[in-house]
Structures are given as structure tokens and as C-alpha cells.
Image (spheres, coloured by chain):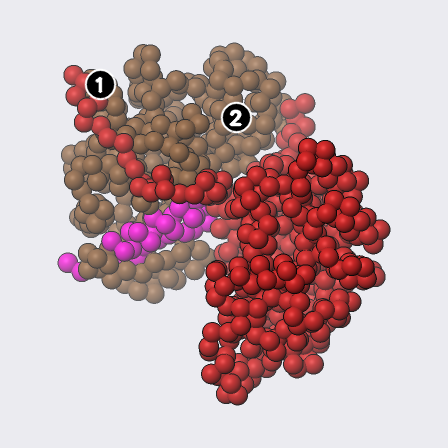
Chain colours: A brown, B red
């Protein structure tokens, strides 16, 4: 049935550009499906814009801040407008990787060992003095990343201790807190999940970044990253990866969809969870549509599914 | 058990990778570009783009020019035109150049689609893969990109308050000569350079010209901001110095983007006739001819003596904004950072302590609604992490003060953070 749908895109996050690409593509699909579509840039006028029309649904095509931290979901709850994707809880607990990793640890879901430090702890508490101990415990190389930032912005692989300071300062440009995480030598995997009751894992995508780290360039399709689908891993590993992804999806109370990023340790075959995305990219080089395509679900069908789940 | 291995397939997003020219390899999307996409939002205080204050133009008059262009000779305005540009406009452009002391004829010019096409045409005309070209470092990104597109090897010469370091330029030219390599050209923005804001001193202009003659090469002098001087004494262009002699070594580029408006997409090149012939062929193969309509309207604009008043109005606005930004920098970053004090143009070049990476400062700044361009974009070799270009031409006085305050706080906080590690 024809619906009036507001596609929320753009916004204030550093991933604005990717969000606009996702939003454009989603809007085109919604129009093809016969819906009335309004593309709304999320700025200071968003409330008035959402109130101006009687929308049946808000399609969240935002990435990062506001769109994946629960902000926009909470506002839509207040306005009483149904929206796509997981709810406030899932967004709040997944956006800050420190929170989600703590939760994974508590639930026994494997995640690379890590320590986090607040930016102000360096200038006010002399936190830099404990860095040698952290390095000793995690070993080198280690991964330094901002606690709350998508698209791998600000992420650095530190191979030598001398490079640690610059990596931390760099990550703190993107977030107030920084994560120092044990580097796992493994296979990068993305497990996308869709479905309301009985969610299912779509074919798992294997990512082979050309520079060894799935960073911003690789993620935005501008590098020479290779993607293999389904991932080239034995069935036994595939099963543990899928089970882990579903466990994460359920643990964070995700509804309708999510994408779980995992690194499968080459040696011990443990699927370590890196993060969960509540509004995965929907561009023509994004992983969720890629996985759906492999499962025989066209982009329009995927969008249609997401809309129908949100309206249920 | 390992069935998946055989079912797996590699995903291809771009089926035509094997067909692209090698020159496309170096052209990739950058993180900075994505960060700067935020600066287009109205709630962002943007020191990023050098956007002229087009609101200062008299729109009613422009409307009249457009009407007249259609009414009096619409059949010409809407038709294909001369590849060298609409002749009556060229007669006006030589008047504009004469104000800056350059005496040339209509026949010495070719009109281009903005200054950027001028750069592209010159690169196409002179550069083969791997050819050496000399630029200022930092230099205008648009020029670097145009040269890179033709796979030039860019040799960046540092700039100082007095402009390009001619001693270093000489060393570079000598080094090339010793290796029997011909530098194809030396590219400079002589007045209030983009991004540094520096102006090449008279002494260095003469030296640079001498070097070009000695090493049998060309200077491409780009002068988009020459008319926008807010203080100090105007210097003769390098082209003027060359005209006083044998007039062989300088190719001069300018644009109407800052004197009128960027949307007209009108630039031009003044060059020796044999070079002009090549450039005209270049125009023909690229666009046949520039927009006659646009050039016809520009002709009307320059036929009205009021255009000089517009320039005075632009100068008044930009001077105030420059002064505001300089005062704000002084108030907030004195003793912490250094910056250029341009006598005109659009840009201030900010240098921060080496420990800071301005790309990371930008990530923080855009979250706090301030944007600028990190310095790395103005170097061909990755330098410039500790620098930034601040455009003062676009924002209001209040926004400049507010934006510089926010930016300064981020810089100070990050220096404090860095110091806490040592």
C-alpha cells in the first residue's frame, strides 16, 4: 500500500556524504515501490519538517552521530512516527564501542581485548604514563580507534610504540574517548542480519583490504578492497560466525536489521566481534545490499522488507 | 566441509577498471573531501571555500545586461561562437589587463571556461607523462590537480613572505638541467597566492623571469586576485616585466570569477601567438567554444563603467573581513601559531605547531560547526599537515570572530593534549 515516507539523510555526522548516497538510493527504490517520498536533511529544522506532513514512516538513512546513537530514534518515538531499523536501546548500546564491547565481555561474546582512555585523562590525569603497560598487555601491533565513529574514520594500526601517541591524538580528533585494541590477525567479515521474528543472517561478506586495514578509503569503495561472497571460510567457521552475529544482534535487542563486523582469528578460529551497525550503508558499494543481492533479494525488495518490518 | 570456498565469488563494483587510463589512478576520493561536504551546510561557519561575495553585485543591473544580450543580439548570444572567445568581450578584457599594467591586444587572448580550463589547457598543451613542472609549495589545488591529471612530476618550491624562494627554484632548475631534464614551466600565483596569501616581491618577480629565460622555460602567471588589493603598493605583474623585454616567457591567466561572479565561468589566457594557436585547438577539442551567452553578458558588465565601483565595493567588504580574521587570530592564537598577513585576495595561511595534524583538527572542528581546508591538499607530496587555509572572503564579521574562537580552542586543547604525552 502506498505510504508517505520521510527519508532522513545527510545530517551532522562526519559520514554525511555516505548518508546522502544511501538516502538517494533508498528514495529511488521507495519511489519505484510506489510510495510518496520526501528527502529530509537532518538539521535544526527537522522537527518542523517532520511535523509539516503526516508521514507514515521515517526511513533512517543516517550514519554515525544522531542516526546511529539513538538521538533521532528517541525524537521519532516522541513524535509518534514509526521508523526503520533498531530502536533506541540498540542504538545507544552499539554506538559507543566501549559500551558495546563491555557488554560483549559480560555476555561472553568474543571481542578483541581492549583498554579505553578518555581524552581528558591524558591532560588531567597523566594517563600517558600507563601506555607502556597497555602496550605490554595487548602487544604490538595494536589498533587505535575512536570510541564512537563510523566508516573507520580515525582508525590506525600501530606497529611501533613510537607511533602510538600520534594515533591516539588522531583518534581523539573524532571522539572524546579512544580505544586501544589488540590486533587480531584474521579474516575481516561482515554479517548482515534482517528479519523481525526469526532474524536471519544473509550471506557473510569477506573483506580483503589492499593495505591490510579496512579503513576509510577501503570502506568508501575508493581503495582496491576485494570482497568475496560468501566468505571463503570453512562451513564450521561460517556456522560460528553466523551464530555469533545473531547473538550480538539479540544481545543488543536489534530489531529488523543490523550488520555485525567480525574478525575471524586465523589461528584459533574465534570470531571476534568488532562492532555492530544499526544503520548500515545502503550505497551501491555497501555490504548489506551486497549480502542481500547474494541471497536473491534485490535492492528494492530489501528496502520493501525494511519498510514492512517497521510498519508492523 | 569446505564447499563455501567453491561457491564464493569476488564482487566487482566497477567492471571497467581494466579500461581506465593510467592517469586516473592518482585520482581518488579523500577523507578531507568527505569532511568538507559538511561545510556546505548553512549552520557551518566555513573558512573552506573561497566563495566570492556575489550578493554585493547589483542584481537589477545584471538583469538588464541579460535582457539586453537577448534583445539586441540574441541570435549571436545563443549561437556557437569564436573558439578564442567573443571578440567584444576580449576588447574589454584587454582594458581590464591594462589597469593592471599589462598592454596586450585582443589577438593575444583566448577566453576559457573559467581559470580552471585555462590550467587544464596549458597542462594538456605542455605536459607529457613524467614531465617536470615547478610550482609554489603550497600551491593552488586546482592547478596541482590539473597538472597531475596529465601525470606531471611536480617540484614544489617553498614560499615565504616575499613569495616563492627563487634561490631554491634556481637550485631545482640547475638540478634538472644537470640531468638534462627540461622544466616545462613554472606555475605561480603572483598576487595574494592561493593558499598562502603571499605576494611575490618585485625583486623575486625579476629573478624568476631571469631564471625562466636562462633555463629556456615558461612562467605561467595566474592572477585571479590582482584587482582585490586592500593595502600596500601594487607591483608590476611578471607578464608586464616580460612585455618590457622580449615578451616570450610569460603566459598569463586570469578570471572573472572574483571580479564578476564564478557562475559566468569565464577565464582567459594571454600568451605568445604560437602558444595561443595550440590553446585554441585545445578549446576546440574540449568545448568547441566557451558560452557565448555568458561572455555576451560579461561584455555588458564591463561596458558599464559601474563595474569599477563593484570592485571597490568588493574590496571594502573583503578588507573588513580580512582585518576581522587577522584581529581574531591575533587575539586567540598569538604566540601559538603563525599566519600570513595578505595585502589582498581571499586567503590566510595558518601554520600551527608541528605536532598538530590539521586534518584531525578539521574532524573535530566540523563537529563544532567550523570548516577550513587542511594544508595537505596544497602540496603534491603530502606535506602541510601542520597548516591550513582559511578563507576570510565568505563569512560575516560575527561568524569570523566566532569561528576563529572555536578553531583556536580546538588547536589549544590539542596542543595541551599533545604536551601531556611528553
B219 on left or right of B75: right
Query: Is residue B331 visible to the viewer in this orientation of the structure?
Result: no
Question: Could you tell me which residue is drawn at 59 percent across and 67 percent down?
Answer: B111
Percent position (x, y) of residue A113? 41, 18
Direction bottom: furthest residue: B72
The mark that comes first in sequence, 1 or 2, is 2
In the picture, the quarter occupied by the C terminus of chain B is top right
Q: Which residue is mark 1?
A: A234
> The numbered mark 2 sits on a residue in which chain?
A
Q: How many neighbours does mark 2 have within 10 angstroms: few (below 14), some (14-19), or many (20 or more)?
A: many
Residue B116 vs A99, above or below: the answer is below
Residue B403 vs A108, above or below: the answer is below
A64 on left or right of B402: left
Percent position (x, y) of residue A64? 41, 42
Q: Magenta part of the protein: which range?
A: A1-29
> The numbered mark 1 sits on a residue in which chain?
A
Amino acid at each position: 500500500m502506498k505510504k508517505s515516507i520521510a527519508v532522513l539523510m545527510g545530517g551532522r555526522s562526519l559520514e554525511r556524504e555516505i548518508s546522502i548516497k544511501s538516502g538517494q538510493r533508498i528514495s529511488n527504490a521507495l519511489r519505484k515501490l510506489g510510495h510518496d517520498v520526501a528527502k529530509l536533511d537532518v538539521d535544526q529544522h527537522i522537527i518542523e519538517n517532520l511535523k509539516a506532513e503526516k508521514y507514515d514512516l521515517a526511513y533512517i538513512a543516517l550514519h554515525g552521530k544522531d542516526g546511529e546513537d539513538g538521538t533521532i530514534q528517541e525524537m521519532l518515538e516522541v513524535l509518534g512516527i514509526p521508523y526503520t531499523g533498531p530502536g533506541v536501546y540498540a542504538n545507544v548500546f552499539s554506538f559507543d564501542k566501549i559500551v558495546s564491547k563491555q557488554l560483549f565481555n559480560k555476555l561472553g561474546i568474543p571481542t578483541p581485548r581492549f583498554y579505553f582512555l578518555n581524552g581528558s585523562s591524558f591532560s588531567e590525569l597523566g594517563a600517558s604514563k600507563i601506555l607502556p603497560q597497555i602496550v605490554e598487555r595487548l602487544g604490538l601491533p595494536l589498533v587505535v580507534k575512536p570510541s564512537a565513529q563510523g566508516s573507520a574514520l580515525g582508525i590506525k594500526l600501530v606497529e611501533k610504540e613510537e607511533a602510538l601517541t600520534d594515533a591516539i591524538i588522531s583518534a581523539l580528533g573524532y571522539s572524546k574517548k579512544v580505544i586501544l585494541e589488540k590486533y587480531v590477525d584474521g579474516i575481516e567479515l561482515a554479517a548482515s542480519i534482517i528479519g523481525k521474528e526469526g532474524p536471519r543472517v544473509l550471506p557473510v561478506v569477506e573483506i580483503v583490504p589492499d593495505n591490510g586495514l579496512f579503513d576509510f578509503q577501503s570502506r568508501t569503495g575508493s581503495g582496491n578492497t576485494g570482497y568475496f561472497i560468501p566468505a571463503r571460510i570453512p562451513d564450521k567457521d561460517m556456522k560460528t560466525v553466523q551464530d555469533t552475529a545473531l547473538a550480538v544482534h539479540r544481545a543488543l535487542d536489534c530489531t529488523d536489521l543490523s550488520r555485525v563486523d567480525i574478525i575471524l582469528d586465523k589461528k584459533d578460529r574465534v570470531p571476534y566481534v568488532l562492532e555492530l551497525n544499526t544503520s548500515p550503508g545502503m550505497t551501491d558499494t555497501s555490504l548489506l545490499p551486497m549480502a542481500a543481492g547474494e541471497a536473491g533479494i534485490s535492492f528494492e525488495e530489501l528496502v520493501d522488507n525494511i519498510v514492512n518490518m517497521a510498519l508492523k | 566441509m569446505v564447499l563455501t570456498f567453491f561457491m564464493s565469488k569476488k564482487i566487482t563494483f566497477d567492471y571497467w577498471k581494466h579500461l581506465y587510463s593510467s592517469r586516473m589512478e592518482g585520482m581518488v576520493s579523500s577523507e578531507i573531501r568527505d569532511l568538507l561536504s559538511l561545510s556546505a551546510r548553512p549552520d557551518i561557519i566555513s573558512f573552506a571555500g573561497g566563495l566570492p561575495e556575489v550578493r554585493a553585485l547589483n542584481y537589477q543591473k545584471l538583469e538588464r545586461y541579460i535582457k539586453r544580450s537577448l534583445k539586441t543580439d540574441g541570435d549571436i548570444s545563443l549561437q556557437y561562437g569564436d573558439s578564442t572567445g567573443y571578440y567584444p568581450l576580449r576588447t574589454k578584457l584587454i582594458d581590464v589587463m591594462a589597469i593592471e599594467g599589462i598592454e596586450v591586444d585582443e589577438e593575444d587572448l583566448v577566453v576559457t571556461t573559467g581559470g580552471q580550463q585555462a590550467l587544464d589547457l596549458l597542462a594538456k598543451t605542455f605536459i607529457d607523462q613524467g614531465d617536470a613542472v615547478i610550482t609554489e609549495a603550497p600551491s593552488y589545488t586546482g592547478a596541482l590537480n590539473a597538472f597531475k591529471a596529465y601525470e606531471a612530476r611536480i617540484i614544489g618550491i617553498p614560499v615565504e613572505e616575499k613569495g616563492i624562494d627563487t634561490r631554491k627554484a634556481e637550485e631545482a632548475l640547475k638540478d634538472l638541467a644537470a640531468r638534462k631534464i627540461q622544466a616545462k614551466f613554472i606555475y605561480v600565483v603572483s598576487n595574494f597566492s592561493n593558499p598562502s596569501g603571499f605576494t611575490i616581491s618585485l625583486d623575486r618577480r625579476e629573478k624568476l623571469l631571469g631564471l625562466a629565460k636562462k633555463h629556456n622555460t615558461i612562467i605561467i602567471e595566474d592572477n585571479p586576485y590582482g584587482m582585490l588589493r586592500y593595502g600596500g603598493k601594487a607591483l608590476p605583474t611578471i607578464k608586464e616585466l616580460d612585455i618590457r623585454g622580449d615578451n616570450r616567457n610569460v603566459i598569463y591567466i586570469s578570471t572573472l570569477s572574483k571580479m564578476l561572479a564564478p557562475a559566468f565561468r569565464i577565464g582567459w589566457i594571454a600568451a605568445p601567438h604560437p602558444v595561443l594557436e595550440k590553446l585554441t585547438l585545445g578549446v576546440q577539442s574540449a568545448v568547441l567554444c566557451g558560452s557565448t551567452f555568458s561572455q555576451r553578458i560579461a561584455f555588458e558588465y564591463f561596458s558599464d563603467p559601474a563595474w569599477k565601483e563593484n570592485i571597490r565595493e568588493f574590496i571594502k567588504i573583503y578588507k573588513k573581513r580580512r582585518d576581522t580574521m587577522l584581529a581574531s587570530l591575533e587575539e586567540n592564537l598569538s604566540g601559538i601559531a603563525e599566519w600570513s598577513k595578505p595585502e589582498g585576495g581571499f586567503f590566510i595561511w595558518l601554520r600551527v605547531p608541528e605536532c598538530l595534524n590539521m586534518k584531525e583538527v578539521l574532524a573535530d572542528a566540523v563537529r563544532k560547526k567550523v570548516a577550513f581546508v587542511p594544508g595537505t591538499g596544497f602540496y603534491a607530496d603530502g606535506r602541510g599537515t601542520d597548516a591550513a587555509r582559511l578563507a576570510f572572503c565568505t563569512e560575516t564579521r560575527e561568524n569570523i570572530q566566532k569561528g576563529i574562537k572555536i578553531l583556536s580552542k580546538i588547536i589549544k586543547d590539542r596542543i595541551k593534549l599533545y604536551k601531556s604525552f611528553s
